[in-house]
Image (cartoon, rainbow, N blue to C red):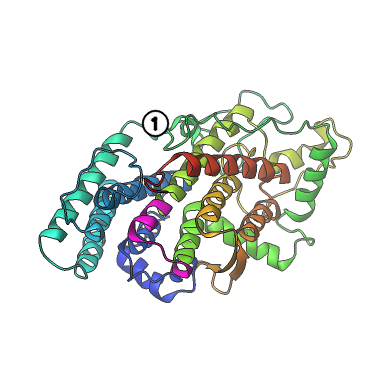
Amino acid sequence: MIARSVAIAMIAILSMPMAAARADVSSDPVIEWNAIMATTTSGQNPFAQARLAAITQLAVFEAVNAVTHDYEPYLGTVAAPAGASGEAAAVAAAHAVLVNYLPTQVDALDDARDATLASIPDGQSEQDGVAVGEAAAAAMIALRAGDGSSPPQFYLPTTSDPGEWQTTPTCPAAGGILFHWQNVTPFGVRSNDQFRAAPPPALSSPEYARAYDEVLTVGGFESLERPVDRSDIARLYNSLLAVAVWNGVGRQLADEEPMSLSGHARAFALLNMAINDSLTTVMESKYQYLFWRPETAIRAGDEDGNDRTAADATYAPFIQTPCFPSYPSAHASGSYAARAVLARLWGAGGHSIAISTPALPGIEVHYTTLKQITSDIDDARVYGGIHFRFDQDAGGKQGRHVGQYIFANDLQPLDP
């Protein structure tokens, strides 16, 4: 997928009824550049996007917090002269991170930076703020060099035993992707196995049979049991993954109940730390258990030792199966981690949230609670035919633990 230019992205943010569109992006550079970050990084795979989002938002936080001193710093190595502009620091930090990792976007990012800085009064305060932001970006970039995110590694199955993950038709010849992601250095949790999921249910268990029957019934490409709204949900949350969904939700919550500049910087740093760390954590669990996908399991249902599972040799999922193991669900892990953070910042309910994407015109969903969003995401993966329900449950539990841990341990207020 080719990344869209920031110039086009900003038009979309201001004109389309998508999750990104609800916040007043002109009122706060942190909010504005969070939207730019989300659209500029949209060409990355969801795991690389989460890493880049966390680097960007932590650089923004570190720059703003060096000016305001409201929270415990993440790095503690960035100093700001008295009177430096926190707004200019936020812009410069986000811009410097993004142009470093996405050099093909430099012209559009430069234009966006110049447009935002034009709204900040010229002078020493702005100049000092820009210098602080660039220093924070450089420090975060240096910190993440050699963090395990490259070079890519792949996994080839060594057995075709029932329950063991197998490559699916769209996998590359090298095998399962993102095998190395389980070793990427996290931003907040102590290690990627800190919240390892419990093992998946036994193939012989009633729990497995129930989940198998559900995805067989509603997840197939030609299923007549999948309601139209669940088809829409499956397509929507196949198009919008964790960074796009939850940063958009965060901007809408900030629009409903604004915080200070530093409050917003902290909120989006915590949010993206949680998303990233839930995804590195879930990949550690995925490659620990190597559990097969429904696409493989249902075609081999007569070989799993469970007389409650009926095989369908022609089964194909409604949406394309990702090329890595099924258990636990990464979309669930990232989403429940995000929900845990946002609920503690803005509350679990009483909201007015709209989610849509220009990629799927005519599909827009509305929510009043964050739980409703994660419930739809759970359904999306099951009705999409690519996950068992227990994949979602385990990923959700894992994500909650990650989000709660990061909120409790990172970027704490200096004056509670």
Q: Which stretch did the figure color magenta?
A: 255-267
Q: Is the residue marked by circle 1 packed among few (<14), some (14-19), or many (20+) residues within 10 Å? A: some
Q: As drawn, which residue projects farthest toward the front? A: 415
Question: Relative to the observer, which residue lies in front, 53 or 319?
Answer: 53
Residue visible at 60% across and 27% down? 288
- Percent coordinates x, y for residue 99 in the rendering: 25, 51
Residue 261 colored in magenta in the image: yes
Question: Relative to the observer, which residue lies in front, 54 or 63?
Answer: 63
Q: Which residue carries the number 1 mark? A: 148
Question: Relative to the observer, which residue lies in front, 106 or 351?
Answer: 351
Judge left or right: residue 159 versus residue 353: right
Question: Relative to the observer, which residue lies in front, 152 or 187?
Answer: 187
- Percent coordinates x, y for residue 130 in the rendering: 18, 55
Disc 1, SS: loop
Q: Is residue 368 visible?
A: yes
- Percent coordinates x, y for residue 81 in the rendering: 15, 50
Judge left or right: residue 144 versus residue 336: left
* Placement of 393 over or under 7, stated as above or below: above
Judge left or right: residue 259 versus residue 275: left
